[in-house]
Image (cartoon, rainbow, N blue to C red):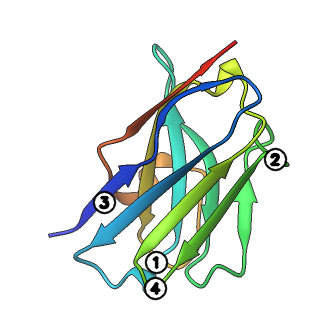
Amino acid sequence: QVQLVESGGGLVQAGGSLTLSCIVSGRTFSNYAMAWFRQAQGKEREFVAGINRNGSSTYYADSVKGRFTISRDNAKNTVYLEMKSLKAEDTAVYYCGIARGGYYSNVVGTYDYWGQGTQVTVSS
């Protein structure tokens, strides 16, 4: 059974930082790309950042480029999202997803499993 468990969300002031973590079990983590998506209230889930299976390639949504960093530790089956210079518009539930293969995509449907989500709230 594949499980993804996110943590690290919370309430932060604008300009602050948070780091999210997602631990994966039930699958050979190093064989699969990972990504972070987010969903604000009343909006569709949107791509935030992706990383390929060995961490050598990453991709970011324009809205977070230069502020967010995705990384992974294959020895710990964990993917991270470091978020800096947070803005009120970053407020959302953040989800990690595991891809069907070794390369990332910004399409929700290309991810097999998702975590339960972690709330990030940025106060202005």
Q: Which mark is residue 83?
A: none
Up-down relation of residue 88 to residue 81 (above or below):
above
The residue shown at (28%, 79%) is 27
Mark 2, Cα crowd under 10 Å, few <14 / some 14-19 / many 20+, is few
The residue shown at (39%, 80%) is 29
Q: Which mark is residue 4?
A: 3
Q: Look at the numbered discs 2 and 3 and tell me whether their residues touch, using CB distance below 8 Å.
A: no
Label 1 amino acid?
Tyr
User: Which of the marked residues, 2 or 3, is nearer the chain's N terminus?
Assistant: 3
Query: Which residue is label 1 attached to?
Result: 32
Furthest-right residue in this view:
66
**SS assignment at label 2:** loop
Q: CA distance from mark 4 to mark 2?
A: 24 Å
Is residue 1 toward the left or the right of residue 112 in the image? left
Q: CA distance from mark 2 to mark 1?
A: 23 Å
Query: Which residue is label 4 attached to?
Result: 30
Percent x, y of residue 84 = 74, 43
Query: Residue 51's quadrant in the figure?
Result: bottom right
Up-down relation of residue 27 to residue 89 (above or below):
below
User: Which of the marked residues, 3 or 4, is nearer the chain's N terminus?
Assistant: 3
Query: Which residue is label 2 attached to?
Result: 65
Quadrant where the image shows the C terminus: top right
Label 2 amino acid?
Lys
Is residue 121 toward the left or the right of residue 97 in the image? right
Quadrant where the image shows the N terminus: bottom left
Q: CA distance from mark 4 to mark 1?
A: 6 Å
Label 4 amino acid?
Ser
Q: CA distance from mark 3 to mark 1?
A: 13 Å
User: Which of the marked residues, 3 or 1, is nearer the chain's N terminus?
Assistant: 3
The residue shown at (73%, 60%) is 59
Percent x, y of residue 53 = 55, 80
**SS assignment at label 3:** strand
